């Protein structure tokens, strides 16, 4: 039996959450094209007969601009220190820059062994892969590199097998019926946030939080969920609600469908939109919305 913790590190929007979801076989982290989608360290757990891989999905690395994003960067740094192995996820479609090399070296030079998942190979010229790998090796980054596509499942099995071989021998570290360390309530809030990020694209910045007021399963099995969508400006509120509430109804409908799939039961969903200006720089609100400092 082999088991251990794998810190999944990389720049924002490199494809970390998508890769973990595919490896685990369950949706344990939300996904959107926007950076800063993941705000907390989320564990995705893959348990098989002879091994258990515990992936720690971390916030994407980028330049902090407010108190919340600074906290997120600290979360990523901490996660990279408390694992058995580091899987650095690099967006292959974006090429390899000097900044990428410096960031990879930061983790490659430590005491924890590392490999690179070179992602999004399904949307890039194949000849770029070998060129980029050569650039990495020419700059002293001598670790295993796995070109993968999470969407096409390319080389996912090979990567999984490699990671198993790198884990220490030992019993399972987490109960085998668990696929994530996050609660149902947390995942419901994340599903709502994901649908907002996907629906509004560049119209709404990253300053969206979800505050759940009611999360209750009735005797008939239906979940009663009442939540607030928090934004930072009045005009953002107007965009989310839309004309005669059309936009909010649409995004809530998409979210409810995913919630029902996740919970395996019907959901009665009530949503409100509230403005909390500059909440990402206000420690009390950061804590209130579930992002512990």
Image (tube, rainbow, N blue to C red):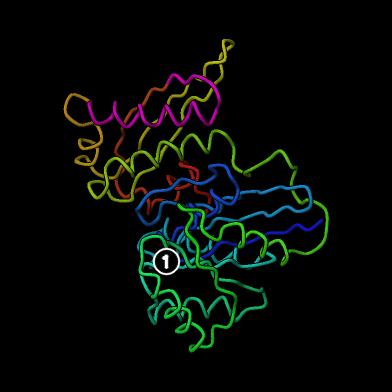
Residue receiving disc 1: 91
**Residue 263 magenta:** yes
Q: Is residue 100 left or right of residue 110?
A: left
Instruction: Measuring from the top left, give residue 205's x and y in whole percent.
Output: 28, 50
Q: Quadrant of the N terminus?
A: bottom right
Task: Look at 53% across and 62% down and name the residue there.
Answer: 76
Query: Does 151 appear above or below 120?
Result: above
Closer to the camera, 77 or 262? 262
For this rendering, which residue is in front, 91 or 70? 91
Q: Position of residue 193 (x, y in %)?
A: 40, 40
Query: Residue at coordinates 36% horizontally, 66% vertically from top-left?
Result: 124
Residue 128 position within the rendered picture, expressed as x and y whole percent measured from the top left:
39, 75
Which residue sits furthest top?
220
Q: What stretch is highlighted in magenta?
A: 246-268
Question: Residue at the spot x=61%, y=50% of the render?
Answer: 43
Most common SS among magenta residues: helix
């Amino acid at each position: 039996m082999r088991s251990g913790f794998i810190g999944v590190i990389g720049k924002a929007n490199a494809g970390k959450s998508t890769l973990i979801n595919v490896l685990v076989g369950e949706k344990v982290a939300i996904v959107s094209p926007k950076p800063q989608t993941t705000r907390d360290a989320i564990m995705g757990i893959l348990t098989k007969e002879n091994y258990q891989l515990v992936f720690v999905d971390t916030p994407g690395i980028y330049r902090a601009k407010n108190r919340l994003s600074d906290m997120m960067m600290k979360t990523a740094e901490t996660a990279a220190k408390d694992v058995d192995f580091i899987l650095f996820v690099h967006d292959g479609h974006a090429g390899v820059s000097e900044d990428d090399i410096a960031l990879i070296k930061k983790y490659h030079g430590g005491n924890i062994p590392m490999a690179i998942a070179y992602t999004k190979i399904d949307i890039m010229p194949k000849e770029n892969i070998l060129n980029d790998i050569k650039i990495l090796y020419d700059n002293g980054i001598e670790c295993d590199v796995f070109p993968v596509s999470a969407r096409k499942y390319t080389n996912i099995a090979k990567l999984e097998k490699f990671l198993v071989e790198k884990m220490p021998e030992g019993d399972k570290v987490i109960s085998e019926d668990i696929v994530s360390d996050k609660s149902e309530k947390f995942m419901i809030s994340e599903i709502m946030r994901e649908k907002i990020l996907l629906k509004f694209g560049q119209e709404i910045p990253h300053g969206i939080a979800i505050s759940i007021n009611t999360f209750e399963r009735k005797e008939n099995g239906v979940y009663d969920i009442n939540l607030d969508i928090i934004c930072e400006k009045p005009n953002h509120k107007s965009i989310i609600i839309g004309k005669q509430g059309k936009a909010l109804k649409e995004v809530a409908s998409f979210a409810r469908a995913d919630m029902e799939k996740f919970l395996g039961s019907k959901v009665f969903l009530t949503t409100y939109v509230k403005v909390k200006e500059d909440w990402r720089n206000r420690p009390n609100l950061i804590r209130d919305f579930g992002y512990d400092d």
